[in-house]
Amino acid sequence: MKLSLPLFILTYRTIIIHGIIWSTAFTTISIVLNSDKGYPNEFEIISGSLYLILFYLNTLLIYPYLMNRKYWWLYIVCFIFIIFGIYHIKLFILGLAEVTIKSSMKPGLFLPTILFFFLSSIYRIIHDSDQYEKRLREQQALRLESELKFLRSQINPHFLFNVLNGLVSMARKKSEHLESSLIELASLIRFMLYHSGKEKVLLSTEIEYLRSYIALQQMRFGEDITINLKISEVEQEWRIEPMLLIPFVENAFKYGIGNIPDPFINVCLEVKGKTLHFSIENKFNPDHDLVKDENSGIGLSNVKERLDLLYKDQYVLHMEDHDFKFLVNLKLDLHD
């Protein structure tokens, strides 16, 4: 479990605000206690120090570590332990000061501690909510920036022109594959129009898009390239960000054909448990830059940026090249 310490301890402005609040709180408590119970000054100083420690201890450690589904009961245990612990410390201090403790005084020894404990919890909740909204705004801003890059990753116009030229050629030859190719192209365009703008789509829909894209590429290149496609059936209706996988396939076709002996592209996709396993391998020409090309869509480096934005700490991406082969392995945690 990672501990996220609030940044308020690092800013002068918030330190000043906290100082004013604490000074006001201690002054108020001192006036109330002196006017009603007549506690000694030493008691007030030590009690104030205990409240201060309690507030930041709960804010920085106890609440973020224990207030969850797994350890909530420990949070309650800590609450009870701290309340009674500070209560007995106060009794000990008053005993040293030879202050007679009446039964009417005991609730006043409990209540401030309980109050500061709950105030610190409320403060942490407000702080976490503010940080969450801040991260959400940052993600939305990054998403907009990413979408601008993402638009460039959609089907290259040259690819469409080549497909259309191929369809024209098939029409002239009255090829029996013309109808199926038109269906694949329609499926591809339908996905771009109706699904690519959504936040998430069904994994099965994303797979259908991959199949259509690969089928059209197979139509273009025919027997000039060997394509091995292994996609396991997806039983559960997992969802995924749209067009997240296609840049890897586009990259394989861009660099896996042309002046390459016996070119091939191997694509494998399967879901194990809640993890998507996706891999793609292709031959490549070492004269090409595999990672980034100003004319190659968003490029693999920007795909990683998109993964960082949308699936931070929920994926593992490994890319390597050896023996004129380029391999991509992606493991992605899926959610319902």
Image (tube, rainbow, N blue to C red):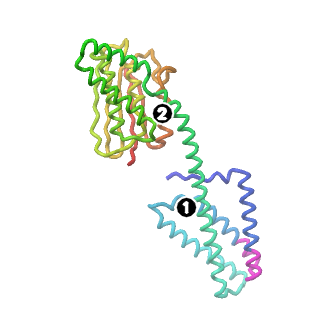
Q: Is residue 37 magenta?
A: yes
Q: Earlier in the sequence, mark 2 or mark 1?
A: 1
Look at 60% across and 60% down and name the residue there.
59
Where residue 169 sits, quadrant-wise, is top left
**Label 1 sits on what residue type?**
Tyr
Who is closer to the viewer here, 173 or 12?
173
**Label 2 sits on what residue type?**
Lys
Q: CA distance from mark 2 to mark 1?
A: 34 Å
Q: Which residues are magenta?
A: 30-46
297 with respect to 264 (left or right) = right
Question: Badge 2: how crowded within 10 Å, few (<14), some, or many (20+)?
Answer: few
Who is closer to the viewer here, 248 or 58?
248
Where residue 62 sits, quadrant-wise, is bottom right
Mark number for residue 304?
Answer: 2
233 with respect to 315 (left or right) = left
Which residue position is annotated with label 1?
A: 63
Who is closer to the viewer here, 134 or 151?
151
* Predominant secondary structure, magenta span: helix
Look at 37% across and 19% down and name the residue there.
256
Look at 47% across and 37% down and name the residue there.
307
- The vertical placement of 195 against 225, above or below, is below
